[in-house]
Image (spheres, coloured by chain):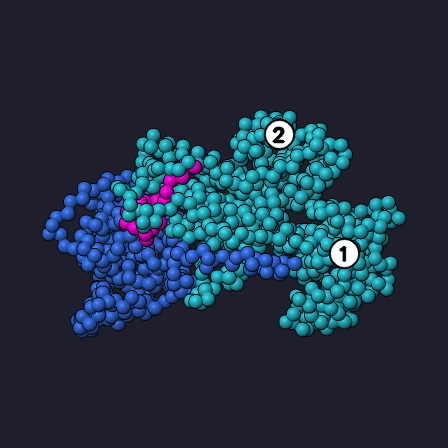
Amino acid sequence: MHDVLRTRVNDFAVKLANVNGTGSASANGLLMQAIFRMGIPVCGKNLFPSNIQGLPTWYEIRVNKEGYSARALDYDLMVAMNSQTYDRDIKEVRPGGYLLYDSSWPLDPDLHREDITFLGVPLAELCNQNFEDPRTRILMKNIAYAGAMVATLDIDMDVVNALLDEKFAGKKALRESNHKALLLGYQYAKEHFDCPLPFRLEKMDANKDKILIDGNTATALGAIYAGCTVAAWYPITPATSVMDGFKGFCEQYRKDPETGKNNYLIVQAEDELAAIGMVLGASWNGARAFTSTAGPGLSLMNELLGFGYYAEIPAVIVDVQRVGPSTGMPTRTQQSDLMMAAYASHGDTRHILLFPANPNECFHFAVKAFDLAEQFQTPVILMSDLDIGMNDWVVPRLTWDDAYRPDRGRVLDAEDLEKKIGKFQRYNQEDENFVAARTLPGVSEKGAYFTRGSGHNKFGGYTEIPDEYQEVMDRLKKKHAAAAKFIPEPELVPREGSKFGVIAMGGCDPAVREALDVLDRQGTPADYLRVRGFPFGEVVERFLANHDFCFVVEQSRDAQLRSLLTLETSVPKDKLRSVLVYGGFPLSSRHVVQGILSQI
Amino acid sequence: MPSIAKPIATHPTLQRNALGLTIRDYEGSMSTLCAGCGHDSITAAITRALWELDTEPHMVAKLSGIGCSSKTPTYFLSGAHGFNSAHGRMPAIVTGAAAANRDLLYIGVSGDGDSLSIGLGQMCHAIRRNIRMTYILENNGVYGLTKGQFSASSDIGSKSKRGEPNRMAPIDPVKLGLSLGATFIARSFSGDKEQLVPILKAAFTHRGFALVDVVSPCVTFNDHEGSTKSYKHTRKNTLRATQADWVPPQSEILAQISKSGTTSVAMHDGSVVNFSAVPKDYDPTDRRKVAAYLDDQPANAVVTGLLYIDPSAPDMHELGQSSPTPLRDLAYEKLCPGSAELERMQEEFR
């Protein structure tokens, strides 16, 4: 037996190779959820194609009792359910590992490997014998391999049964066939293999205060809790489930008990040009409004993002980043919208950005985005990504402070206006954060003013006079800088004897944390700074100043976070080195460790 | 856009409306458009219609895109919030604004470039959603601010100032509106205030998308011999298909004793639109008949009037079943499910 495969409890990785559109996602999700319910730290990554049916798709489950939740890359067990990808799937199994396949047909002898164990389960045969309907036969193959995994990995059968009962509570026939298929795979594995395998599961109690949630659902929930009432969007992968989630929560929580009417309005726009326009229109008129999109949509929104910035209108934009440029790879993840988002639109523009690292932060930062947008009267972009947005993450339970009230920013009401002498001046008399008061339509004639994207002076009047124009533009720059004090503080993880710093944002977090532990054990301790928003503040400046050099770990070819740091802080360019992983799959600690070690 | 404040001098004999306001209270700053521009006449018609309707100025929001026409919201109703948006994007801004507050009167002013080229998609979708707004398309067949290019409403054969003829078929906003299901469609001429003011009053009262296409000659770039959007050509070829009058709710009885043989359409708010003249067999509530009538007219005819009306179609808020209280006015307590529910709900995420 290979050394690496000595009995290991709650520390291994499984990869499942499937054909998309065959129902594998629900079986894979079932396994992941069962492990979660066993109280074991687990993470699942869905590596899926931009396609409805027929192309290869993979799901990875990593179990780690220490709580490391980045991708593992070393697969102890491969569930090879897709003949199109057998050859590469078989290569990915670590030496001494296992491969579970459908033995209804013989495996190509060319694909054989001496150093791994092949577990053949005649899944198609079992399902054909036990189910009549062709579609059911295909679907149940997935549940049958899940059954085999229950046996080989020692997953708690009661937990799995309970999950199936919940999932198919109102559907007796489906429930029964699922239970049956599960048992078919389970029994076959029990009878034919030495169960459990050397790596297996054992119940823990690590998930008591945790939930299993994807970032898009959490973002949508944040919008609900923030009091958002208007949403406008255009369907786009991987952001669509933000609005699906928002709609679902609205149906649940926003049906007015007195009027029976909807305390929300969601508009599916004709394109992203319109979606951002609707958000600006609604926010200008005093509602909390947001849109969700991905890179191609954000490209289209550039025009009106500049408008929102210059005319000082709140807006919340959720950008669930995917691989660009152009259509790129819509179902793969990246952090490559950063530079566009930071300066979106022509002219001198700069925006407030938030970088959530997981679904828990998606929830809280979504609320924060609405507050910042109204406080600073400007668009705020929540920079999520496909990995955070569409994968289920195990995160601490969401908490809520009932004392929270939305920060609507400086808005003059009818009473304020009544007291006012003379004409309301939209961009005059700014506060210490360089924000001037606004008024809402439909409140008072005394608050009327003209919102415009054309040159204007501090009174809100049209201007082409250089000094008047510059006065407003200079204040806008100061206003953006002032926001640094209000965006979430960076997360700082110092380490004894550190030799350098490591900087990351968003979904790189789990891989970087794990890598820093690995490096520390190897005698290379490093400090960690996770930036959580833009503009950068004092903490970022200090961190950069206090280190001889820093690594910036990120998911873009052009090192966009490094670029933004060099542009927006006083750090000399040569103090920043890059670790870049931008092929479209979530990061692993190995990428980070190797990337750093190769440069020191 | 540049604007010059008007001195406020109210003559004591100026008539006051039910709110005690004179027409001067519905004006804006001085126009900076070319002298004789059709758009200024439309501005005057809007001002008059709002004054006659006793509209509270602050209950109006006036929005526009980019172009000469889009400058005009500065020139009327200074007591209302204005929004001069980006080129072709006014419909989306209005959609969002209307979503947030259903109680305001939304007046969108656009032009043929803004509406029929860069903003065609947005205009079409605002029609589909039946946004409660009046969409005034100040149509001069030319790009004025960029000095005289043809627009998408230029007729075949219409000549540019340099004598070059347009060869591409125009987009006719009226026929477009009919095919898209617009619920209120009118065409008028900037030089015909007698027709335009009542049309605007009806449009402002309409619960849904009111499309008002107004031929509005550009004196600088498209008022020459050979242009089909000139004053001369429009006057010569105008065919007043209908004459409509708007009658306020409280005078409904008067409406019923109007001239015999006319059509009356009851509006959602109880007011009535009286058609004092329509062609034989013309029914302004029958989309197919209106389309057939328009198809039968000579190619060069500028058919004007309130052409089609459907006061019963649901608007965006009715389609969306949204709250009768404007969404922006809902108390936060009504919107947030609270911590206990968050705690409970998360059992589903396990």
In the image, A105 versus A446, the foreground residue is A446
Q: Secondary structure at mark 1?
A: loop
Please provide the residue range marked out in magenta.
A433-451
Residue A31 at x, y percent in the picture: 72, 58
- Taking the spot 69% from the left edge, 51% from the top edge, the residue there is A43
Q: Is residue B98 above or below residue A308?
A: below
The CA distance from mark 2 to mark 1 is 43 Å
Amino acid type of the residue that numbered disc 1 sits on in the rendered structure: Lys
Amino acid type of the residue that numbered disc 2 sits on in the rendered structure: Leu
In the image, B83 versus B120, the foreground residue is B83
Letter of the chain shown cyan in the rendering: A
Magenta includes A435?
A: yes
A308 sits to left or right of B73: right
A379 sits to left or right of A56: left
Residue A206 at x, y percent in the picture: 71, 52
Locate the N terminus of chain B by quadrant. Answer: top left
Q: Is residue A175 above or below residue B24?
A: below
Magenta includes B185?
A: no
Residue on which the image places disc 1: A203
Letter of the chain shown blue in the rendering: B
